Image (spheres, rainbow, N blue to C red):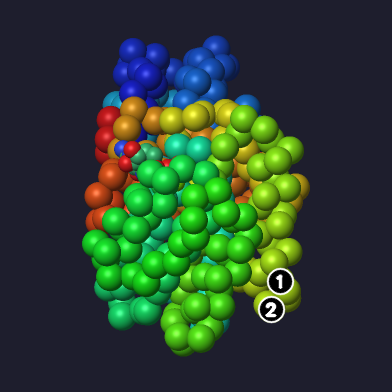
Amino acid sequence: MKFFENLNFSELFSKKKIDNNLLDKFEELLIESDVGTEIASELKEKFKKEKIGKEIKDEKEIFEFLGNQISKILEPHERKFDDLNKNSPTIIVVAGVNGVGKTTTIGKLGRLFKNSGKKIVFGAADTFRAAAIDQLELWSKKIGAEFIKSDLGTDPASVGYKTAKFAEENKLDIAFIDTAGRLQNKKNLMEEYKKIFTVLKKINPEYPHETILVLDATTGQNAINQVEEFKKISNLTGLIITKMDTSAKGGILLAISKKFGLPIIAIGMGEKDTDLYPFSSNNFSKILVNNK
Ligand SMILES: Nc1nc2c(ncn2[C@@H]2O[C@H](COP(=O)(O)OP(=O)(O)O)[C@@H](O)[C@H]2O)c(=O)[nH]1
Ligand SMILES: [Mg+2]
């Protein structure tokens, strides 16, 4: 995560009194970090209130200020992990466009819930590529989850159905339904998702209990469009942001929570099964600040 990589505050502020010109530059730097214009201006105003006319000792002072403010902005959006498994079985659809990390995230989520003794199943409703089915099957073997699949090209909704039924009949705790996110034909994709929801609701109107949208932090502002599209077809219950271990700027998370008010569940920090962290606004802001 390189949120502050391009924020060269030391040059900007060193031994200068904070004036409006400096504040504008501060705001510009924040906008470059994907936080969005609203939050950038909000942070500028707060900074102004506290520091105008004063001298800044060093960069640390600015990072501390930003860290605290970011934590405050994100705190209301924290979604506690334990909260995800209130029903038995809990049916979770994992959605998102191709390549964001859905399948990997299911593997990692599975690992975390397995660690706390939950019985789980993965359903391979991304039926368009054999490799996608195999990938999820590998994860299921790795962490000891049950696995449901159909033949290549089968209707994804039928896999969703089978997976939820399997979870019920075997008294499992959680079913994770993996999906395809091919964006080549947006209309078809959204129709496929709708069908999965419709079929699940036929089993139980409360299904799915969760629809988690996975976003890739490296996509920057485009992540906002993705949330908009998926919000149209489903009741999103939370977000997971992947690839925060890369050069992605974490700022997009602030822009998204501001715009949509969606809960944030976890952060992906790598490709291994142990690389998923329940979201904590406090830790997240600390990582951002300390990574400089
Ligand atoms: N560095 C990094 N890579 C990730 C992370 N999550 C997923 N990936 C990688 O992103 C690629 C696409 O992931 P995949 O789970 O297949 O995405 P899907 O198409 O949404 O199912 C794979 O190479 C994953 O290993 C993450 O948090 N950090
Ligand atoms: Mg996948």
Image location of residue 36, percent across then percent down: 59, 30
The reply to whether residue 153 is in sight is yes
Mark count: 2
- Viewport quadrant of the C terminus: top left
- Per the image, the residue denoted by label 2 is 204
Q: Is residue 205 above or below residue 272?
A: below
Q: Secondary structure at mark 1?
A: helix
Crowdedness near tag 2: few (<14), some (14–19) or many (≥20) residues, C-alpha within 10 Å: few
Who's the residue at 57% across and 54% down the image?
A: 154
Q: Nearer the viewer, residue 238 or 214?
A: 214
Q: CA distance from mark 2 to mark 1?
A: 5 Å
Q: Quadrant of ligand 1?
A: top left
Secondary structure of residue under mark 2:
loop
Residue shown at the point (54%, 32%) measured from the top left: 35
Identify the disc placed on residue 201. 1
Q: Amino acid at mark 1?
A: Lys
Q: Which mark is residue 210?
A: none
Residue at 55% of width from left, 63% of height from top?
159
Residue 58 falls in image quadrant: top left
Residue 197 location in percent, x, y?
A: 68, 62
**Residue 1 sits in quarter:** top left
Residue type, mark 2 in image: Asn
Looking at the image, which is closer to me, 175 or 241?
175
Q: Where residue 158 appears, x then y in whole percent?
A: 61, 63
* Label 1: how many Cα within 10 Å (few below 14, some 14–19, many 20+): some
Question: Mark 2 touching mark 1, by CB under 8 A?
Answer: yes
Compared with 51, 81 (above or below) is below
**Position of residue 252 measured from the top left corner of the image (x, y, whole percent):** 52, 35
